[in-house]
Amino acid sequence: MSASQSFVARTGSLFHRYANPGRFLRLGTRLQPWLTWPALFFTLAGLGWGLFYAPADWQQGDSVRIMYVHVPAAILASSGYAALAVCGLLSLVWRHPLADLAAVEIGPVGACITALCLATGSLWGKPMWGTWWVWDARLTSVLVLFFLYLGHIALIRAFDDPQRGYRAAAILALAGAVDLPIIKFSVQWWNTLHQPDSITLTGAPTMSSSMLWPLGLSMLGISLGFAAIVVARLRAAVMESRVRSLLSSTRRRGENA
């Protein structure tokens, strides 16, 4: 066995440790309250602080408060699709059974958060740019991401054979991931109306700490909320799948009796 095949085998073994539905349900049940309650707390704290107590921007005024929703939504829109691509990789390479179910449940949540990103971006753009929408590189690439989410949702449910839908949607998720670096670097690659990122991994934040702290709390809370919703949906999907399997087994035993 080659080194690459050995790596794939070892990695697949690691992933399949968490493929057992019963094990996932036990883990999800323990995780759910630790995601849900902190999500509510940090979201309310961050939005309350940002919307009512943080200072207005010296240039943008109170319209800057939209960022306490828009920025977390924008980050999660890309992060959610990255999670879809990871699920697609796990499905195609390692045939991970929970990866397909996770992809089914992540898609609608990601589409909703991307729609929220586009809506809040339009609300922010109107007072800043004088229009609700421009065909800016950042805005257009996020709109493409929204359509990719919708295509994934439709494709994964488009076949009578679920496995064909899973495979087709996994390929779309991996192919569509090329849009993520375009979204990230669009403001550096092109001359756009959208402002550069205020928070980067390579430099200091370009905003005041009095605005950065509530933004951080909002990002943490909304991110935990995103995870909580996905885990809750995935738990429900796993339980539904187990019930269907049980009913199917009972029906077959009845037919053979």
Image (tube, rainbow, N blue to C red):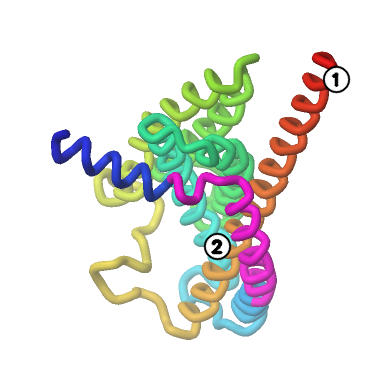
Look at label 1 and name its amino acid: Gly
Which residue is denoted by mark 1 in the rendering? 254
In the rendered image, residue 229, in percent from the top left (x then y), is placed at: 66, 54
Q: Nearer the viewer, residue 156 or 189?
A: 156
What is the quadrant of residue 108 in the picture?
Answer: top right
In the rendered image, residue 59, in percent from the top left (x then y), is placed at: 46, 71
Residue 33 in magenta? Answer: yes
Number of the front mark, 1 or 2: 1
Residue at (34, 50) in percent of width and height: 184
Q: Secondary structure at mark 2?
A: helix
Q: Nearer the viewer, residue 240 or 186?
A: 240
In the rendered image, residue 42, in percent from the top left (x then y), is placed at: 62, 75
Could you classify mark 1 by the number of other residues whose Cα lies within 10 Å: few (under 14), some (14-19), or many (20 or more)? few
The answer to which of marks 1 and 2 sits earlier in the sequence is 2
Residue 247 in magenta? Answer: no
Q: Nearer the viewer, residue 114 or 97?
A: 97
Q: Secondary structure at mark 1?
A: helix
Look at label 2 and name its amino acid: Ser
Which residue is denoted by mark 2 in the rendering? 223
On screen, residue 138 above or below 51: above
Q: Nearer the viewer, residue 128 or 226?
A: 226
Per the picture, the main secondary structure of the magenta-coloured stretch is helix
In the rendered image, residue 122, in percent from the top left (x then y), is placed at: 57, 49
- Residue 204 is left or right of residue 173, and the answer is left
